[in-house]
Amino acid sequence: MQSKTPKHILVIRLSAMGDVAMLIPVLQVLNAKYPKVKITVLSRKFLKPIFDASITGMDINFHEVDTKVKHKGALGIYKLSKELKKLKIDAIADTHNVLRSKILGLFLFGIKNNKIDKGRKEKKALIKHTGFKQLKTTHQRYADVFKGLEFDLDLSKHQFPNKPSLPNLDFINSIADHGKKWIGIAPFAQYQGKMYPLDLMEQVISILEKNKQVFLFGGGEKEVKILNKISNRYDNVVSVAGKLSLLDELKLIAHLDTMIAMDSGNAHFAAMFGVKTISIWGITHPFAGFAPFQQQENCLLPNLTKYPKIPCSIYGNKVCNGYEKVMRSIAPENIVKAI
């Protein structure tokens, strides 16, 4: 007979990067309260570094899902279920709750399974402004999934682990001796409506780099080129885009004094380490529950009197008519002042 409290949990979160990062503080609370419970995370290979022991302070097992080839389609998900059954999992925390994870749950019939409540009705009301209020955070929604599996988690008791060692790289070692405060800036976001204009962000950079060390974060060929051009114009600005592995990037972020980011994955990376994280919001709103962990007071929003329809969407993929320039209502000086 299966015991009331599971001994081995499969935690499902296949994407996106920021949502995966938001799992970390919840798993840390789980691990601290139930240290004997084994945790296996099911996600994509490129996200594995987020769960590295040097980052989380925990021994988390990682099982890779390959949705492009090996685990593609219903047959691929069936193969995945056969792999997972060998791990002797006795509970599933589905923190994603999408079609793929639902089908996997069917193949793993008989194993206790609890799925996240994404709060779609409340989020729809938030966009329509028929229920404009702070909704349950994604972190708490994750915690509620575990509560349904008999794990009662109090996120207010979370403790950050020791910071990982800095990457042993020449350009970082040379900067480490300068004695300046380290500021990270991640200026990009998945959607244009969530991204602070680059010309204004460069004004922020030009002010900060006078007496601080600035690191620029980004990914992809286009972003790398843009950030390299910006960094080349200043003495105390370094672009790490395309230069570090994800694991080394996380280790560097852990040592920042402050991170400036959009409503994006990098904000959640910094918050994982308790780094002061100033998140800049455009057509989305932290009321939807996606603010970085314990950083609600550091969210900078546009002029909501001028742009009362914010949030236009939950994820930033839809822009209200005439709201294309909402970010320009946030002055660069206000970002600097927040630091």
Image (cartoon, rainbow, N blue to C red):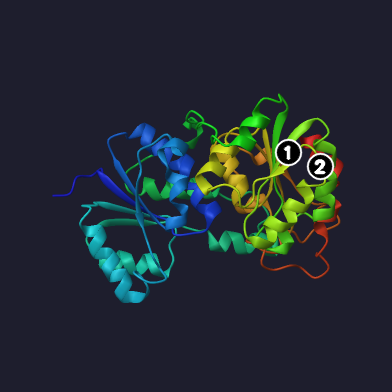
Quarter that holds the C terminus: top right
| Position of residue 2 in the picture relative to residue 327 (left or right) | left
The residue drawn where x is 32% and y is 35% is 34
Identify the mark nearer the N-term, 2 or 1: 1
* Location of residue 307 in the rendering, given as x and y in whole percent from the top left corner: 82, 58
* Location of residue 16 in the rendering, given as x and y in whole percent from the top left corner: 52, 58
Could you tell me the amino acid type at mark 1? Val
State the residue in front, 88 or 153: 88
Q: Residue furthest left?
A: 1
Disc 2 and disc 1 in contact, CB within 8 angstroms: yes
Secondary structure, mark 2, is loop
Could you tell me the amino acid type at mark 2? Tyr
Q: Residue furthest front?
A: 170
According to the picture, the residue beneath numbered tag 1 turns out to be 214
Q: For the residues marked 2 and 1, what is the alpha-carbon distance in whole angstroms?
A: 10 Å
Does 119 sit above or below residue 232? below
Please rate how many residues cluster around mark 1, counting C-alpha atoms within 10 Å: few if below 14, some from 14 to 19, many from 20: many
State the residue in front, 172 or 316: 172
State the residue in front, 201 or 307: 201
According to the picture, the residue beneath numbered tag 2 turns out to be 234
The residue drawn where x is 53% and y is 54% is 17
* Location of residue 55 in the rendering, given as x and y in whole percent from the top left corner: 47, 38
